[in-house]
Image: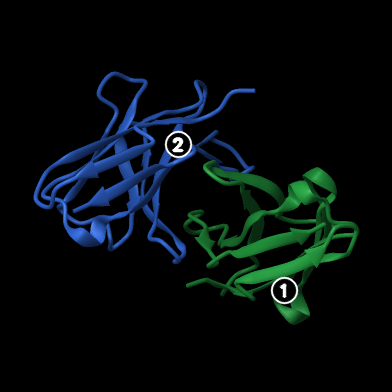
Chain colours: A green, B blue
């Protein structure tokens, strides 16, 4: 079984500030990890994913995430927030070798202040 | 850029009625999924569909639910005898066969059962 915990249902930052959205996972096998973004009235869009290889993963819109096995974490960061980054962000984990169906976290709403 | 589309965007129905939610997948995708998100809660997997049959389903996906591809293009979710607790956002997702395990989500259908 796998699970995801996203710390903080809401994160508020100022425009230009660092964005840090936290995700911790549990998985009985080496996981595949994903971050999705959901803008208002839209579906989920993949930001980035980790499957194997380099643990620092770069995605779209300047976001990146680092897989830390020892901490069972996959936190999402962006050096400088833009107003357009305001959205809901979902971390997800799937288990290769078994079911690839992802388990999603509850989501974190990113609020960007001018 | 190809995208997954869903209709209707919002469906209001009375308790006990049947609803059909429709999804048009990206044309070369072979794997299809339905998820739901009850307001304020996690995105939950319902069912996956491949090669014209269900490949995996969650415990949520009971006899009240069914899926099909009636014309080889649309992918539908039917909910029989709707209940108040079926009120949620329903997302269709599609994916290519292969190693990316990336799913492309539609914008969702908001189902309100009164």
Chain holding disc 1: A
Indicate whether B37 appears above or below B51.
below
**Does mark 2 fall on the same chain as mark 1?**
no
Q: Secondary structure at mark 2?
A: strand
Q: Quadrant of residue A91?
A: bottom right
Q: Is residue A20 left or right of residue B91?
A: right
Badge 2, how many Cα within 10 Å: few under 14, some, many 20+?
some
Q: Position of residue A76 (x, y in %)?
A: 76, 63
Q: Position of residue B92 (x, y in %)?
A: 42, 40
Indicate whether B53 appears above or below B81.
above
Q: Quadrant of residue B85?
A: bottom left
Q: Is residue B48 left or right of residue B21?
A: right
Q: Position of residue B13 (x, y in %)?
A: 19, 44
Provide the residue designation for mark 1: A73
Q: Quadrant of residue B58?
A: bottom left
Provide the residue designation for mark 2: B31
Q: Secondary structure at mark 1?
A: strand
Q: Residue furthest front?
A: A114
**Front residue (pair A36, A28):** A36
Chain holding disc 2: B
**Front residue (pair A22, A84):** A84
């Amino acid at each position: 079984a796998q699970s995801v915990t996203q710390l903080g249902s809401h994160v508020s930052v100022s425009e230009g500030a660092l964005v840090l959205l936290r995700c911790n996972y549990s998985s009985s096998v080496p996981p595949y990890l994903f971050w999705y973004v959901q803008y208002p009235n839209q579906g989920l869009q993949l930001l980035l994913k980790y499957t194997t290889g380099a643990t620092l993963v770069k995605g779209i819109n300047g976001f990146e995430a680092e897989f830390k096995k020892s901490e069972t974490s996959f936190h999402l960061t962006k050096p400088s927030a833009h107003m357009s980054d305001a959205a809901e962000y979902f971390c997800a984990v799937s288990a290769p070798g078994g079911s690839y169906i992802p388990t999603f976290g509850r989501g974190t709403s990113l609020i960007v202040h001018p | 850029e190809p995208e997954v589309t869903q209709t209707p965007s919002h469906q209001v129905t009375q308790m006990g009625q049947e609803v059909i939610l429709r999804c048009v997948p990206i044309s070369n995708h072979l794997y299809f999924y339905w998820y739901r998100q009850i307001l304020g809660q996690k995105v939950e997997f319902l069912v996956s569909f491949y090669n014209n049959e269900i490949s995996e389903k969650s415990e949520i996906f009971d006899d009240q639910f069914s899926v099909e591809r009636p014309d080889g293009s649309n992918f539908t979710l039917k909910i029989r005898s709707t209940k108040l607790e079926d009120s949620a956002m329903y997302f269709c997702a599609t994916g290519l066969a292969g190693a990316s395990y990336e799913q492309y989500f539609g914008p969702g259908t908001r189902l309100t059962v009164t």
